Image: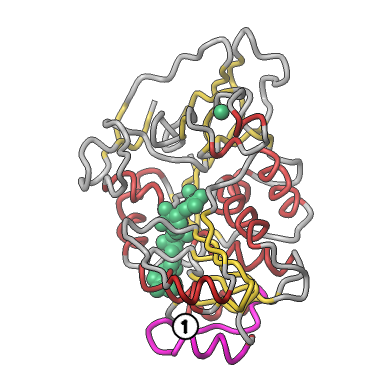
Amino acid sequence: MKAAVANKFGDILKIEDVAKPSIEPHQILVKIHACGVCHTDLHACHGDWPVKPTLPLIPGHEGVGEIVEVGSAVTHLNLGDRVGIPWLYSACGHCEYCLAGKESLCMSQENAGYSVAGGYAEYCAAHADYVVKVPEGLNYVDAAPLFCAGVTTYKALKVSEAKPGQWVAIFGVGGLGHLAVQYAVAMGLRVAAVDTGAAKRDLALSLGAECFFDFKTDNVVEDIRETTGGVHGSVCTAVSKAGFRQSYDVVRRGGKCVLVGLPPEDMPLPIFDTVLNGVSVVGSIVGTRKDLEECLEFAARGKVKAIIKEKKLDDINDIFADMEKGEITGRIVMSL
Ligand code: NAD
Ligand code: ZN
Ligand code: ZN
């Protein structure tokens, strides 16, 4: 089968002919029809993070498609079912986190396109208990970005605990951020968005953000505080240390700063202000299968729609280059 493979950190991916995966009794085989390109895939191929993926690697954790083989121990899925394979490829199912419905914190989890082969391929094996069905009325291309960008930002907004009518600041209007704006609006929140350039401004405002600030030309922190009085929650998807600090500085007393983006840097925090202002700073990692079902439902009901440019697997190196420059509007989805 055809796959995009990372053989060395920092090198371009190679389109290769590799063996089609064989499945275990608890697995299914999915014929991938579409796979979104997440900035995490770029981090993976660059070896940016402390825990590195094993090479050679087939990246991809927004792969969706149809089931073409069902393992002998699988009883709840059928041939032809439409499913997606998210970042949370599998978890142990019996640790304290799994039992508490916090499976994305499981210490024994596998991650698609990182610790195991992902969706940048014609076929992908998956754990039957951790794939999530694509609802009817949602096509493969539109569904793909929701399996990471969608569920991650939907969950981060829940974690922010911002209530309808309150303000949230969304830092980064990229693949994740443009969905964060839409989920926030659908949840009744008021949105201040931050990114740079006319394309991101137009995108954010067209999706329902009430105001947009350009991190290259505006005084982001002052402007947001003046417009909103300080936000109740902020969600930082920016791949930038400076963006993280600003996302902290715009939160009002008692508010929550939710960290989502994963630049390989530290974030120094002022102890005094954090204590006196009662501000929470909290990380949010993807979402559970339940979060994913909910987030897909918003899209199936037409409340959220990823802005997508469709490309092919062979385009992956150009897609990565554009992503590094911040030149993608919305999400790129490779159709296979
Ligand atoms: P992307 O490249 O599509 O978008 C990033 C956006 O941030 C771009 O539009 C860029 O212009 C903008 N940006 C850069 N500097 C900024 C700043 N200072 N202020 C505001 N915006 C700024 O990337 P993506 O696919 O949306 O992923 C974003 C990050 O989130 C990556 O680090 C990725 O690894 C991480 N991620 C985390 C999770 C999680 O579960 N926590 C899940 C998926 C992705
Ligand atoms: Zn992702
Ligand atoms: Zn577990």
| Mark 1 crowd level (few <14, some 14–19, many ≥20, 10 Å Cα) | few
Q: Up-down: is 325 above or below 197?
A: above
Q: Position of residue 115 (x, y in %)?
A: 39, 31
The residue sitting at 56% across, 39% down in the picture is 104
The residue sitting at 56% across, 75% down in the picture is 203
User: Is residue 206 within the magenta segment?
Assistant: no
Query: Taking the image as drawn, is residue 333 in sight?
Result: no
Q: Position of residue 153 (x, y in %)?
A: 59, 57
Q: Position of residue 162 (x, y in %)?
A: 70, 67
The residue sitting at 45% across, 76% down in the picture is 246
Query: Taking the image as drawn, is residue 101 in sight?
Result: yes
Q: Is residue 186 left or right of residue 111?
A: right
* SS under mark 1: helix
Give the camera-side residue of 32 and 56: 56
Q: How many marks?
A: 1
The residue type indicated by label 1 comes to Ala
Q: Is residue 218 left or right of residue 204?
A: left
Residue 164 falls in image quadrant: bottom right
Label 1 within 8 A of ligand 1 by Cβ: no
Give the magenta-colored segment's residue range. 207-227
Residue 207 falls in image quadrant: bottom right
The residue sitting at 62% across, 71% down in the picture is 255
Q: Quadrant of the N terminus?
A: top left
Give the farthest residue toward the top: 72
Please, which colouring scheme is shown? secondary structure
Q: Position of residue 168 (x, y in %)?
A: 63, 73
User: Which residue in the protein does label 1 denote?
Assistant: 198
Q: Is residue 238 left or right of residue 12?
A: right
Q: Up-down: is 36 above or below 83?
A: below
User: Is residue 219 within the magenta segment?
Assistant: yes
